[in-house]
Amino acid sequence: MRLLLVEDELDIQSFLKRSLEEAGYQVEAAADGKTAEQFAIEGAYDILIVDLGLPDMDGIGLILKLRQLGVSAPVLILSARRSVDDRVRGLEQGGDDYLTKPFALAELLARLRNLLKRNSPPGNESTRLRVLDLELDLLRREAIRSGQILQLTSQEFVLLEYLCRNAGRVVTRSMILDKVWGMRIQPDTNVVDVHIYRLRGKVDGKGQQPLIRTLRGVGYVLKDR
Amino acid sequence: MSSRTARPVVHSAAWRISLWATLAFACGTMLVFVFLHRFVADDIQRRSDAWLSGEVEVLGDVAERTPKDAVYSRVVGEVAELAGKEVPNKLLTESSANDSVFFLQTGVDGSAKLWVGAGSGEANLKAIRTTQFVSGGPTDLLVQGFEIPFRVASMRMEDGSQIYLGLSERDELRVLRSLRLRFILLWLLLVLLGFGIVFFTTRRMLSHVREITEAASRIGLFDLDARVPTTDRSDEVGHLARTLNRMLDRIENSMRQLHTITDALAHDLRSPLTAIRGKLEVSLSTMAQHDQAEQIVSAIEELDRLNDFLSKSLDVAEAKADALRLNRSQIDLDELLRSMIDLYEPSMSERGLQIVLRSAGTLTISADAALLHRMIANLFDNELKHLPAACTVIVRLDAVEDAASLVFEDDGPGFDPEVILHVFERRVKGKNSQGHGLGLAFIDAVARAHGGTATACNPRAGGAKIAVTLPIAALVEL
């Protein structure tokens, strides 16, 4: 996957480049709009990360210009601004995504994956999810582990489904709040942890290999190996 | 605008002003007409009196010179009848039967000597006998059988007899009546015309004021770049509009300045935060030793809290200046509360707290989703952080008039009495509170930004109570 990173803060640019490369992307970085434009036209990128505050031009101006020039790769917009510009909303509706600084790397990676998935032809959506010995029947809303049906509430099922869909990858608390409860909030209290704790009690029975792992300071991961 | 058609015209200032102006105008013109009427009535009276006095003199003269023989009554009678045909104010179409004039001559003993007029003259004679005539001018005489009095002039003859010439006031009154009718019609027309003119001019003038008011109320809440409509005229209203616009220029400038400062502050702090957080995450992923990882984890958590504090702080600052920018959408509060309770219930029961929702059902309001979510999360966080075990939180949602009322009530220890009056201010927190003292200020800020209110109190029954009201519709639709 070829990725163009447009970010003028070199500190941010360098850690992003490194982390994205670790995640398997081929990263090209540009620190201003003009360089980014050149890169985007010359190289065929699968996805772009564009910071809104560039020294020589507005990030949105750059994206709109690239669209005019025929660059159709999806864009993840990074912004340190407080309010979301109407033009950003427009781009969001057009299939691009938006992330506020500061962000967790896991969330950035998840959004990139989503953008790439959105732009690839839809595969056959399976009605069953399987992670190791855990199986989710999405039609009957049933979770089965080692042949045993788990007694989950509907909310717990949605949470487990989200973890399964991202099995092997880190999900942060704010990602869970966003995708499972539909809220972009940052509670002062450990509300998500309690939900995970309860779910874990039901999913990881006695003597079974624990599936839901906590990565402190980062989030959670459902083990797939 | 819906308000323009919905408000009845009788409640408008234009209506009231026109009503008072018309009342004054009507009284004035009425007064003028009354004086005019009196003047005309006096004039008519004077003319008919002059006619009566003249005629009675002529008749007296004729009666004096006519020999008192057999033809006397015929001669005098004919002269009297002739006079009756020249009555002033008489209608031309009136029949020849003349009952508006009478002539009477009485002898020295007061008995009737000669009568010219309709009927026998008995009633007239009776009325004359009971009336005291003053010499010099005609007098009013009410005769039985006639509704309208006669105006009677008398003259004493040399032979001691008395002659009377009576003229009914009927014609005089008819003239006055028709004059009054015309006056009243003219007056009504004038008053209506005056009302119309005053009403339409004031309405036109006040419609400018209303346009300015409507535009100004929209501007305050939504976009500060708009201006109230101005006219080229240099009257008071035009001046008002231009003054308002100059004031708006200044407000917009300060508002923009505030936004620039808060945005720049956010940007300048978030960029390094992003870099620090990224570096911490990178080092966390490469960290082997557990105890060092623990420190990085807590550093990341501190950083996230700092970032949240920064956002809330700026939101509160902007809301205090009524400058918080909203991105409104339709939100069902009932649904939102249910999913919030779903989110918070496990944490609450983990701490031995019970939560009860009392909602009247779907209640959709126009609000900024992100701010509202954070505000309600703050309300729950507040309960979670401050309540001891075994307490109950009751969340009530009702529609009160055109606002949504959201009440959080608990049976805990209540607010610290020292801070109860200032709980919605920044950095105010109870002695045992571990928060940064921004949660409740943020709740107040969001409520304010939506045109609602937030209040806190310790009810008599104990516990703490926070009540938030939020208008159901965005204010522009009012």
Image (tube, grey):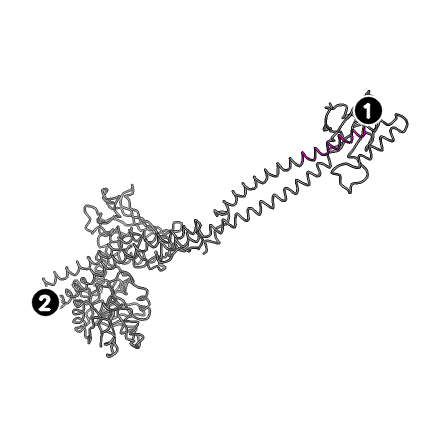
Badge 2 is on which residue? B288
Where B366 sits versus B44, above or below? below
Q: Residue B419 at x, y = what percent?
A: 23, 44
Q: Is residue B273 left or right of residue A182?
A: left
Rendered view: B45 above or below A69: above
Q: Residues within 10 Å of mark 1 (few under 14, many from 20)?
A: some
Tell me the SS state at disc 1. strand
Residue visible at 35% across and 60% down in the picture: B329
How far apart in space, not on screen, are marks 2 and 1 (Cα)?
149 Å
Q: Amino acid at mark 1?
A: Thr
The segment highlighted magenta reads B41-59
Reading the image, the residue beneath label 1 is B106
User: Picture coordinates of residue B376 (x, y %)?
Assistant: 29, 54
Left or right of A47? Residue B230 is right
Q: Does the magenta portion include B58?
A: yes
Residue type indicated by callout 2: Ala
Question: Which quarter of the rendered picture does the N terminus of chain B lie within?
Answer: bottom left
| Magenta region, main secondary structure | helix
Q: Which is in the foreground here, disc 2 or disc 1?
A: 1
